[in-house]
């Protein structure tokens, strides 16, 4: 026997220095902007002096252009983050001044009204809305570029833009849309909804959460500015060595990717930790809503895939700036190395976009069918299967490159296998629809649109995964049409459904479904016209990324352009519905859909700490509907009673 | 106990379970099942013309001019045909959900009177088996076709099955921004920016690039391979039609990528030889 003496130790609370928040009180988006611009100017000036002793002008064609533009980019990133206050936390920590409770509440935006959206705010709900707005801004930018591309392709009798600018449009549209689509669901839903759905009070790492959104905000201007200094002329994949020929605008692209990859890694770690460790008591893995699985899967794939992309761009940057030759074949580099690194990201990234959207659809369909999700475990198996295979299929983008022709066999196998787990997800959706009367609201309409597009995108994907057929379709408009069906038809329409579903929770108001539905269905119609015609152009043999083509492609391109303008108008209508509803929509209660998941059990607007008392989960997430009168055991009992064999 | 069942004896099969065929019959006799199946068949027949329409679009610039391209078109045809039933079924469920089970609008959700179907083992197993079989079919078909095309590609084995390896026409294809150059090492290194080929004579392409990555795409011949700087990639084909066909660049290669296209002229044997004698010098190998 031993006795232990228990000492009551007073935990030392950090001392409050000055007002809560300290220097963070004075920092916001505008100081960030000023810091970025000033430091960019200083760095650019210094590098220009360093490289060119007076002879150089601001002409970006000169030899110092690359390093100067690089210095400007570094200055922007460091200055913006510094001005936002991203470094205040680490510095404070090094000085031994930890945050007090009041500091933390200030950081979470308590009592700052709408201005908290302009700050380095740690509240996950603020971050979620910031992600939503940012995604919409990038989508708008990418959409505008898409309109310009379609204008060029619709005007078949002349060149509207010079070819270099056209190529920049194509590349910038590609990468802007990829970034927007990666964050459009994972950002707002992953940050706003998932912690509440888990029954947590915030994300696991609130300050990293704020860092991830402001890194994204920081990553976008370099891409836009790069359009002014040569642009991204090489498609979003910026294959080497074409990449090396481009102007300094390419450094803008590389900066964007490197910063964005950091943002994604931070966000992924944060989301995964939150989901793994902060789910409510009683929310076992078999009671966790499917959306959480989907967001977790996307975060896991992003964490695995983005480093490849980041390396490829860092190596490209050193090739350009300090004459390394990772990818320069003249000096022993390899273009295939670049292609491998790129597509090691490139294919998982497609699922990083698709899975969250699909998970939102899976999440909302039981609510609007008033039925449980059909085969919850099959849905999980589908998501896990996609994640497992996503890292093993990258070389199907390289069938025609001449790199390892024999690799066609295993990659054809792995690629086509992925249609089994994707098929599971379709089964779950149609199984949930089976024998149910749906509640006809806009989010439910998105389910129909998404499944329709997913079948077309999925089936055309089978042709592309097949090496012989790919021998015709690779590098051809057919590919463009296919991935737009997946990324826009499934992911963006799913995201629009998700916005319609979560709008009351995000904003406290009902979405004007009349206007939004007009926008939605007009976009759907325009979408079918645009990309249906693009399939035809591809079958006829029109290569991708060309601005002029034979006359036989004219008709399909005209139709495609008409469809694209329709989408443009439709998206503006949808946006108008969002903006007007946000400002002056009818106030919505906390749970307008009568949903059963935790996110809808909080009042709207959600209080700063989400739940006054942490919830305990005692049941399944989708407990809707009545016992099935046609369940097999019941039918058998009936048959027995009737005396049939 | 006297009547204890020995462990080795198999448990008695349940006798109160209706036979599988009867359950299937019961299921098929339900109204919504019949309707979904009818709609599936209707949509399937509506989609069926796609099998030919896709090929018609592919043939718009010219009919296949090699065995490889014929294989590719056959693949597209078969894949479309196989994908139609499952696509039609999913579309039929969507359609029946809209017009059969229908929806209800309103501010409040409809009463919770939908059956809580949490799972259905038969449906899940059927779906998994069917999709696995389809995938297996696609993979096996693709691999066989790929093997077939690879065998036909390298010029050693023309479509008629006879090996004429010594008769292979070798063409060195070089892409550079933004033209194609075709060099004939067997014909005194004659070079041209138009690709001249001989009907029924296998041709081996050694493809490379002088600057950036291009993609050598002989559309009607079904040949496609990247032209990489610093590497030579090989492919081949046996044209089986005379005529004029297209070469396009299928990999973005900079400013004038769109204009990087040229012609293929496939001649008969005599015409090709005389043309080469007149323009390209004698045969050197």
Image (spheres, coloured by chain):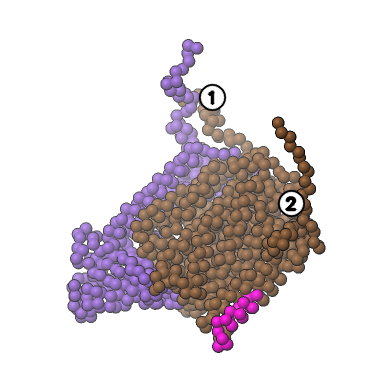
Chain colours: A brown, B purple
Same chain, labels 2 and 1: yes
Residue located farthest toward the front when viewing the structure as drawn: A2
Q: Is residue A15 part of the magenta span, yes or no?
A: no
Position of residue A457 measured from the top left corner of the image (x, y, whole percent): 48, 57
Q: Which residues are magenta?
A: A39-55
Q: Are marks 2 and 1 in contact (CB under 8 Å)?
A: no
Quick one: A327 or A461, which is closer to the camera?
A327
The residue that disc 1 covers is A641
Outermost residue, right side: A18
Query: Label 2 marks which chain's residue?
Result: A
A641 relative to A172, above or below: above
User: A79 and B206: which one is in front?
Assistant: A79
Query: Quadrant location of the N terminus of chain A?
Result: top right
Q: Which residue is mark 2?
A: A609
Question: Foreground: A197 or A300?
Answer: A300
Q: Residue B97 at what x, y percent from top left?
A: 55, 47
């Amino acid at each position: 026997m031993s006795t232990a003496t228990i000492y009551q130790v007073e935990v030392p609370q950090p001392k409050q220095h000055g007002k809560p928040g300290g220097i963070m009180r004075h920092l916001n988006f505008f100081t960030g902007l000023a810091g970025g611009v000033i430091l960019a100017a200083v760095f650019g000036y210094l590098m220009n002096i360093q490289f060119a002793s007076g002879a150089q002008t601001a002409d970006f064609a000169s030899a110092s252009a690359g390093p100067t533009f690089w210095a400007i980019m570094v200055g922007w990133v460091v200055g913006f983050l510094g001005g936002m206050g991203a470094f205040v936390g680490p510095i404070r920590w090094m000085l031994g001044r930890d945050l007090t409770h009041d500091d933390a509440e200030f950081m979470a935006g308590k009592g700052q009204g709408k201005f908290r959206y302009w700050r380095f705010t740690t509240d996950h709900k603020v971050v979620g809305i910031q992600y939503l707005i940012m995604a919409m801004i990038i989508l708008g930018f990418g959409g505008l570029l898409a309109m310009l591309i379609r204008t060029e392709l619709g005007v078949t009798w002349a060149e509207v833009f010079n070819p270099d600018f056209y190529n920049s449009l194509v590349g910038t549209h590609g990468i802007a849309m990829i970034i927007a689509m990666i964050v459009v669901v994972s950002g707002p839903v992953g940050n706003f909804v998932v912690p509440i759905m888990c029954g947590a009070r915030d994300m696991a790492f609130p300050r990293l959460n704020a860092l991830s959104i402001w890194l994204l905000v920081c990553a976008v201007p370099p891409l836009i500015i790069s359009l002014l200094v040569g642009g991204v002329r090489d498609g979003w994949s910026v294959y080497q060595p074409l990449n090396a020929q481009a102007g300094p605008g390419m450094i803008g692209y590389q900066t964007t990717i490197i910063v964005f990859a950091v943002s994604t890694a931070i966000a992924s770690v944060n989301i995964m930790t939150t989901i793994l460790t902060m789910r409510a008591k009683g929310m076992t893995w078999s009671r966790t809503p499917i959306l959480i699985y989907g967001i977790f899967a996307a975060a896991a794939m992003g964490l695995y895939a983005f480093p490849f992309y980041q390396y490829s761009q860092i190596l490209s940057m050193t090739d350009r700036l300090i004459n390394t030759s990772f990818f320069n074949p003249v000096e022993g580099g390899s273009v295939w190395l670049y292609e491998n690194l790129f597509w090691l990201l490139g294919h998982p990234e497609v699922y990083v976009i698709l899975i969250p959207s699909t998970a939102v659809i899976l999440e909302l369909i039981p609510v609007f069918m008033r039925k449980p999700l059909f085969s919850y475990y099959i849905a999980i198996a589908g998501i896990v299967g996609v994640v497992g295979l996503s890292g093993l299929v990258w070389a199907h983008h390289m069938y025609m490159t001449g790199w390892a022709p024999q690799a066609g066999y295993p990659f054809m196998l792995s690629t086509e296998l992925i249609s089994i787990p994707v098929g599971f997800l379709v089964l779950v959706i149609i199984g949930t629809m089976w024998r149910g009367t749906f509640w006809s609201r806009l989010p439910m309409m998105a389910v129909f649109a998404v499944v329709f597009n997913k079948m077309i995108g999925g089936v055309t994907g089978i042709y592309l995964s097949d090496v012989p057929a790919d021998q015709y379709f690779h590098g051809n408009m057919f590919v463009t049409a296919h991935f737009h069906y997946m990324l826009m038809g499934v992911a963006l329409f799913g995201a629009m459904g998700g916005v319609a579903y979560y709008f009351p929770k995000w904003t406290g108001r009902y979405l004007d479904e009349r206007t939004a539905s007009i926008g939605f269905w007009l976009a759907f119609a325009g979408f079918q016209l645009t990309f249906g015609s693009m399939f035809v152009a591809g079958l006829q043999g029109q290569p991708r990324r060309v601005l002029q083509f034979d006359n036989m492609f004219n008709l399909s391109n005209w139709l495609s352009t008409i469809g694209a303008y329709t989408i443009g108008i439709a998206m503006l209508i949808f946006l108008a519905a969002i903006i007007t509803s946000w400002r002056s929509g009818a106030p919505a209660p906390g749970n307008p859909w009568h949903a059963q998941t935790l996110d809808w059990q909080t009042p709207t607007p959600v209080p700063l700490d989400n739940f006054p008392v942490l919830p305990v989960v005692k049941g399944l997430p989708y407990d809707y509907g009545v016992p099935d009168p046609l369940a097999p055991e019941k039918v058998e009992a009936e048959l027995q009673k009737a005396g049939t064999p | 106990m006297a009547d204890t069942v020995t462990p080795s004896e198999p448990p008695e099969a349940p006798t109160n379970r209706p036979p599988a065929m009867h359950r299937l019959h019961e299921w098929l006799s339900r109204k919504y099942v019949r309707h979904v199946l009818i709609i599936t068949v209707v949509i399937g027949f509506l989609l069926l013309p796609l099998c030919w329409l896709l090929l018609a679009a592919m043939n718009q610039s010219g009919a296949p001019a090699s065995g490889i391209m014929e294989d590719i078109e056959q693949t597209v045809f078969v894949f479309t045909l196989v994908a139609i039933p499952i696509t039609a079924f999913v579309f039929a469920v969507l359609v029946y959900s809209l017009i059969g089970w229908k929806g209800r609008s309103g501010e409040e959700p409809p009463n919770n009177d939908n059956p809580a179907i949490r799972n259905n083992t038969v449906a899940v197993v059927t779906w998994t088996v069917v999709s696995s079989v389809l995938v297996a079919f696609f993979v096996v078909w693709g691999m066989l076709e790929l093997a077939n095309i690879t065998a036909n590609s390298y010029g050693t084995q023309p479509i008629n099955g006879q090996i004429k390896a010594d008769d292979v026409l070798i063409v060195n294809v070089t892409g550079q921004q933004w033209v194609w150059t075709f060099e004939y090492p067997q014909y005194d290194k004659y070079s041209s920016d138009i690709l001249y080929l001989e009907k029924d004579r296998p041709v081996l392409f050694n493809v490379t690039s002088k600057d950036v990555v291009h993609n050598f795409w002989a559309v009607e011949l079904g040949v496609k391979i990247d032209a990489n700087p610093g590497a030579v990639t090989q492919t081949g084909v046996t044209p089986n039609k005379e005529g004029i066909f297209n070469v396009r660049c299928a990999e973005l290669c900079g400013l004038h990528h769109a204009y990087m296209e040229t012609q293929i002229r496939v001649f008969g044997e005599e015409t090709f030889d005389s043309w080469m004698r007149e323009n390209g010098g004698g045969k050197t190998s």
